[in-house]
Amino acid sequence: MNDKIIVANWKMNPQTKKEAEILFNDISSNIKAVKNKNIIICPPYPFLFISSKIKNKKIILGAQNVSKFASGSHTGEISPKMLADFGVKFVIVGHSECRNLGEADKIINEKIINLLKNKLSVILCVGEKDRDHDGKYLSFVEKQLKNCLAEVSKYQLKNIIIAYEPVWAIGKDAVREATAEEFVEMKIFIKKVISDIYDMKVAHGVKVIYGGSVNSSNAQAFIGVGEADGLLVGRDSLNAKKFVAIINSLN
Ligand code: PGA
């Protein structure tokens, strides 16, 4: 997959299936002519069914999370097999909003292992809460990567996309937007860590995307200057016009 990857993370939105259907439809009908981009839409679980109603080969279905268990007595949990059966191809794990609710690296690692067993691709989110002058944020991200990728082989890594999402740049309470230069620094660092865990060839091939307050004014900088392999979009993926504007802003 050499095309740019644009992920829509709808989070816990919208509130009704009617709204979800409209959003899905509006995005779908406006991206028919889009080239060299893979659009992955991650609606909340109850709205996954909509993709089967609105068929568009340009849209790849994603999920926002998964259980660490494969099946059984786990109330409220959703298994990788259930997602795969719904046509889901990618699953986000390790999002900072899930980590905030107590999802530890070990759990994320178990989820990744289970997803890969079920032939699902992974979007692994990493990112520091804040930045410091001593570079502690780098070792923070390094630890996240090493813990979350434990026991993942270099062959399996081909099915994992790393999403760098600095927590301080996410959501409406973001401290500020990240710059493309800050992304470049982190992308190089992530590749160095991947090279330490695996080897240089693997590090060269791994895809690193950017997420955090992406909009149509800053998207191209992350892709152009930052050489990001793609983008993960939260708020601006909830408005078809804004989301399509992001996609169209990319060269
Ligand atoms: P945002 O969210 O685009 O609203 O900042 C990004 C994310 O959390 O994935």
Image: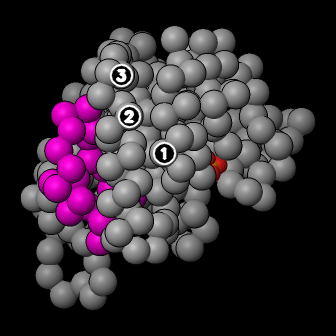
The answer to whether residue 51 of the structure is visible from this angle is yes
The residue where tag 1 is placed is 240
Q: Position of residue 201 (x, y in %)?
A: 36, 12
Tag on residue 30? 2
Query: Residue 42, can we see it?
Result: no
Would you call the spot at circle 2 few (<14 residues within 10 Å), some (14-19), or many (20 or more)? some
73 vs 98, left or right, is left
Question: Local crowd at mark 3 within 10 Å, few (<14), some, or many (≥20)?
Answer: few
Which of the two discs, 1 and 3, labels the residue nearer the N terminus? 3
For marks 2 and 1 on the same chain, the one whose residue lies earlier in the sequence: 2
Front residue (pair 164, 15): 15
Q: Is mark 3 within 8 Å of ligand 1?
A: no
Asked if the residues shown at circle 2 and circle 1 are in contact, with their CB atoms under 8 angstroms apart, the answer is: yes
Looking at the picture, does residue 84 appear above or below residue 183? below
Categorize mark 1 by other alpha carbons within 10 Å: few (<14), some (14-19), many (20+): some
Residue in the image at 74% along x and 20% along y: 181
Q: Amino acid at mark 3?
A: Val
**Residues rendered magenta in the picture:** 43-64
Q: From mark 1 to mark 3, how far is it between C-alphas?
A: 14 Å
Question: Does residue 29 show up magenta in the picture?
Answer: no
Counting from the top left corner in percent of width and height, residue 14 is at 47, 67
- The numbered dot on residue 34 is 3
Q: Is residue 45 magenta?
A: yes
Compared with residue 128, is residue 65 higher up or lower down, i.e. above or below?
below
The residue drawn where x is 38% and y is 34% is 30
Residue 79's spot in the image, x, y percent? 21, 68
Asked where in the image residue 21 lies, by quadrant, the reply is bottom left
